[in-house]
Image (tube, helix red, strand yellow):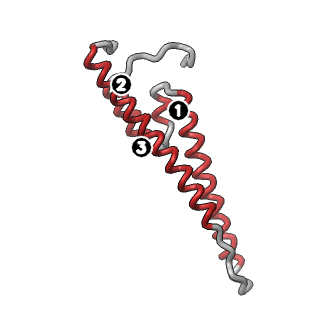
Amino acid sequence: MKLSSPRAPLSPARARNCAILNQFATPGLGSLMARRIVAGAGQLTLAVIGFALFCAWFVDVLRQFYGMINSDADPQLHPWLALAGIGTFALAWVWALFTSFSLLREAKRNEREGILIPP
């Protein structure tokens, strides 16, 4: 796949599949499939960062509660880490939602103007 080649007209079926992938699988993956490289890379990066922050919080909580088995120390939870992860992932998801709407509008316009390439 050449990234420098012009985008092929987006069909409604392809736009729908990319939107579904964006919203229900991984934010950014559908955008990349629709050749929205910058938006897709940004969405995917934010989603991975958000997931990593949430996983770091989860591992920290497990480590502290596991440490309580042998001691009576109170856990020092860091809810800001979980909230930052959830917020970052939500930002990627909302960005992917707007991109998905854009893809669907573009596909409708292509279909209406008859510029789709026949299979």
Q: Which residue is drawn at 55% across and 46% down?
A: 47
Q: Residue at x 54, y 39 (%)?
A: 43
Q: Position of residue 77 (x, y in %)?
A: 65, 72
In front of the other: label 1 or label 3?
1
Q: Where is residue 80 in the image (x, y as percent from the top left)?
A: 62, 63
Q: Mark 3 points at which residue?
A: 23
The amino acid at mark 3 is: Gln
Q: Residue at x 53, y 13 (%)?
A: 5
Q: Nearer the viewer, residue 64 or 82?
A: 82
Q: Name the residue under label 1.
A: 39
Q: Where is residue 46 in the image (x, y as percent from the top left)?
A: 58, 44
Image quadrant holding the C terminus, namely top left
Q: Which numbered marker is on residue 106?
A: 2
The amino acid at mark 2 is: Glu
> N-terminal of the two: label 1 or label 3?
3
Q: In this view, does 39 lie above or below 7?
A: below
